Structure formats: C-alpha cells, structure tokens
Amino acid sequence: MKISLKASDPLMMMEAYRMLADKVEYPFHLGVTEAGTPGVGTIKSAVGLGALLSEGVGDTIRVSLSADPVEEVRVGIDILKSLGLRKGGLTFVACPSCGRADVDLVKLAREVEDEFKGLNEEIHIAVMGCEVNGPGEARAADIGVAGGRGIGLIFKNGEVIRKVAEQEIVQAMREEVDKFITERKAAKTAAVEAD
C-alpha cells in the first residue's frame, strides 16, 4: 500500500505530505497532479517533488504534464538527478546569457543540448559563453566549452584540448564526447580484464 496526496498546488501538496509523514509508516507516492504544460508543469513538479525528496519524504514519484508521457519521464529523471538520487545519462549545464558572452550562447546551448539529447551515457557537458566564468565551469565538466570572440575553447577533464571556430563548436563537442565515451569504455574493459 502507498499513500498519494497529490494536488495541483505544489505548496498544498508539500504541506499535506509533511503533515502525514511523521504519522504513518506507509510509503508515499509523490506528485503535483495536473501540473500543466511542460514549461510551468516542470517548474511546479521540480519545486514540489524536489523539496520533499530533499527532506527524505517520498518513495515513488509521478510527473503529470500536459505532454507526451516520455517528457514526463525525462523531467522526473532530471529531478532525481539534480538531487543526486539517480545517476547516469547526460548532465548538461550552460551559463545564463549576459553581456560578457562572446558567442551566441542561447543558440549554442540549444544546439549542444539537442546534439546530445537522448544520450544514455553518464557524462557531464558544460557550455559557457565567455572567458570570465566559462573556464571554471568548463573545467569542472567531462567535456566543456568556453566561448571567446568567435571561438570556443574545448575542455576535457579540466584541460584545454582544442580551440575551434564558433561555427565548429557543436561538431567539435560531438567528436570529443564520442572519444571520451570510447576511452572510458576501453578503460573499464581493461580494468575488468586485469581483475
């Protein structure tokens, strides 16, 4: 038996689960029901589910969007990954657009995210728009890029490995991600064979 106290209002839903959490031993099925379209529904679900899960409340989740059920699953996985409750797949970060960006950051981030959508390998990719904050975040990723005036510095495991023209960034990222995954698989195979 599981208890579900879902509501379309995240604050009401969170309060209901919190009130009952100390009173029963049953597992809780969390959800913001009828959350809405992917934009607002994702936010409401992330707030409601994220807050409770971060407090240790909840055993199963359901994201309810007015969208393809595949989108519901993707959002649920992203919520769990952002809380460290699930591993694997793509972790994608991009800086906000600001006056320091030396590349078309919004376009670049969208293109890189689209390029790797559906990638089931555990990998951290960063897209940064300038040389001020960009190198720090790009270094922290498995594969990252820090934009400059018409160029991109490609990072792998914290080191600059390539400098490419802005229009070549997405292709360079694809090449480096593919190499990274191949190298990691080869290292894992070698480690298994060594044991």
Image (cartoon, helix red, strand yellow):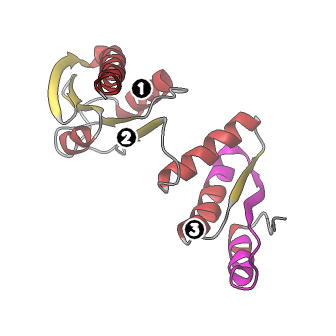
Q: Secondary structure at mark 3?
A: helix
Q: Residue at x 46, y 21 (%)?
A: 115
Q: Earlier in the sequence, mark 1 or mark 2?
A: 2
Q: Earlier in the sequence, mark 3 or mark 2?
A: 3
Q: Secondary structure at mark 1?
A: helix
Q: Residue at x 23, y 31 (%)?
A: 147
Q: Amino acid at mark 3?
A: Ala
Residue 178 higher or lower than 136, as above or below? above
Mark 3 or 2, closer to the camera: 3
Q: Which quadrant does the C terminus fall into? A: top left
The answer to if 130 sits in the magenta stretch is no
The answer to if 19 sits in the magenta stretch is yes
Q: CA distance from mark 3 to mark 2?
A: 23 Å
Q: Residue 112: give its label.
A: 1
What x and y, as percent, mark residue 144?
28, 32
Task: Give the extent of the magenta segment.
Answer: 13-42
Which residue lies under the disc numbered 3? Answer: 51
Q: Residue 93: give its label.
A: none
Q: Would residue 143 appear left or right of 52 to someone viewing this image?
A: left
Q: Residue at x 42, y 26 (%)?
A: 112
- 165 or 124, which is in the foreground? 124
Q: Residue 94: give its label.
A: 2
Q: Amino acid at mark 2?
A: Ala
Please report contact status of discs 1 and 2: CB closer than 8 Å, yes or no: yes
Residue 70 higher or lower than 168, as above or below? below
